[in-house]
Image (spheres, rainbow, N blue to C red):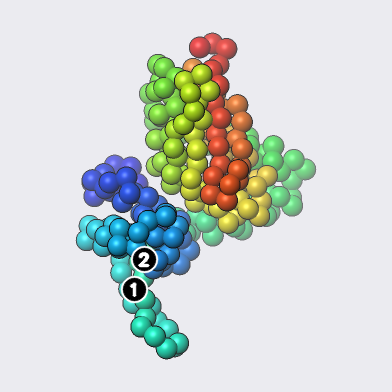
């Protein structure tokens, strides 16, 4: 999490590996991480071992009854367990919302909006569009979305390369993505940012969602 003295010293690649471990529901092998992040296995192993050394991940040997050498598996420490608990809770609550409300997507977006506004109380108001985009990207990065700011100054966007709730979003995109949309809109609106979220395009590719931004009328 942001502010952790060990995590703050990680490289960008190290943070990506850590986010992958935290999002996973089971311990991951070197090959699992390398495939997920399109890394060479030696690179993935280097970062996994680095995370283990600073206490952000743990290493274990796979228990198996099949023939062959058991794999070495890695899992995030307590923060990863917390993330898996949130995922389990979401997997219970999201179907209830989908089935129990007349307007589940609208209610989900309103809940996300309120969440984003609460998060905005910790942030300073951005003076420029670039600062607003960077601030939103930093928030999404802290939440594990692996954001990549992109686009032009007139039409900025943030590419989301990793969703901590990807499996759930594929089953209930109307709920999960609506929460994400509301969160980003509420966050920027509460800050009075000179940009606003104009659209969220979910699952443009299997591992890509796009948050599109536009200048506000007051900017």
Position in image of residue 120 (x %, y %): 45, 29
Q: Are marks 1 and 2 in contact (CB under 8 Å)?
A: yes
- Label 1 secondary element: strand
> From this viewpoint, which residue is outermost toward the right?
102
Q: Residue at x 48, y 23 (%)?
A: 152
Location of mark 1 (residue): 72
Position in image of residue 36 (x %, y %): 45, 57
Location of mark 2 (residue): 30
Quarter of image, res 72: bottom left
Q: Is residue 176 left or right of residue 146?
A: right
Disc 2 residue crowd, few under 14, some 14–19, many 20+, Cα 10 Å: many
Q: Is residue 99 above or below residue 151?
A: below
Residue 25 seen by the camera: yes
> From this viewpoint, which residue is outermost toward the top?
218
Q: Residue at x 45, y 67 (%)?
A: 26
Cα–Cα gap, marks 1 and 2? 8 Å
Q: Nearer the viewer, residue 37 or 108?
A: 37
Position in image of residue 106 (x %, y %): 69, 37
Q: Residue at x 49, y 51 (%)?
A: 164
- Label 2 secondary element: helix
Q: Earlier in the sequence, mark 1 or mark 2?
A: 2
Disc 1 residue crowd, few under 14, some 14–19, many 20+, Cα 10 Å: some
Q: Nearer the viewer, residue 123 or 6?
A: 6
Q: Nearer the viewer, residue 63 or 104?
A: 63
Give the number of callouts: 2
Q: Is residue 79 above or below residue 217?
A: below
Q: Residue at x 40, y 29 (%)?
A: 134
Quarter of image, res 92: bottom right
Quarter of image, res 109: top right
């Amino acid at each position: 999490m942001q502010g952790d003295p060990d995590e703050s010293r990680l490289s960008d690649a190290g943070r990506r590996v850590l986010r992958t471990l935290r999002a996973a529901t089971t311990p991951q092998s070197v090959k699992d991480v390398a495939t997920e992040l399109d890394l060479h296995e030696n690179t993935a192993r280097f970062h996994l071992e680095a995370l283990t050394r600073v206490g952000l991940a743990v290493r274990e040997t796979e228990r198996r009854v099949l023939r062959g050498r058991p794999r070495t598996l890695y899992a995030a420490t307590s923060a990863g367990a917390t993330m898996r608990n949130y995922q389990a809770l979401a997997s219970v609550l999201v179907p209830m919302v989908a089935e129990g409300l007349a307007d589940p997507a609208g209610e989900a977006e309103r809940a996300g909006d309120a969440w984003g506004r609460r998060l905005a109380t910790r942030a300073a108001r951005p003076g420029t569009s670039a600062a607003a985009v960077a601030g939103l990207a930093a928030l999404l990065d802290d939440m594990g979305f692996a954001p990549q700011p992109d686009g032009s100054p007139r039409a900025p966007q943030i590419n989301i390369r990793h969703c901590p709730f990807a499996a759930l979003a594929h089953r209930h995109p109307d709920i999960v993505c609506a929460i994400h949309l509301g969160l980003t809109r509420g966050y920027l609106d509460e800050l009075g940012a000179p940009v606003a979220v104009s659209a969220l395009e979910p699952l443009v590719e299997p591992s890509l969602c796009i948050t599109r931004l536009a200048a506000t009328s007051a900017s």
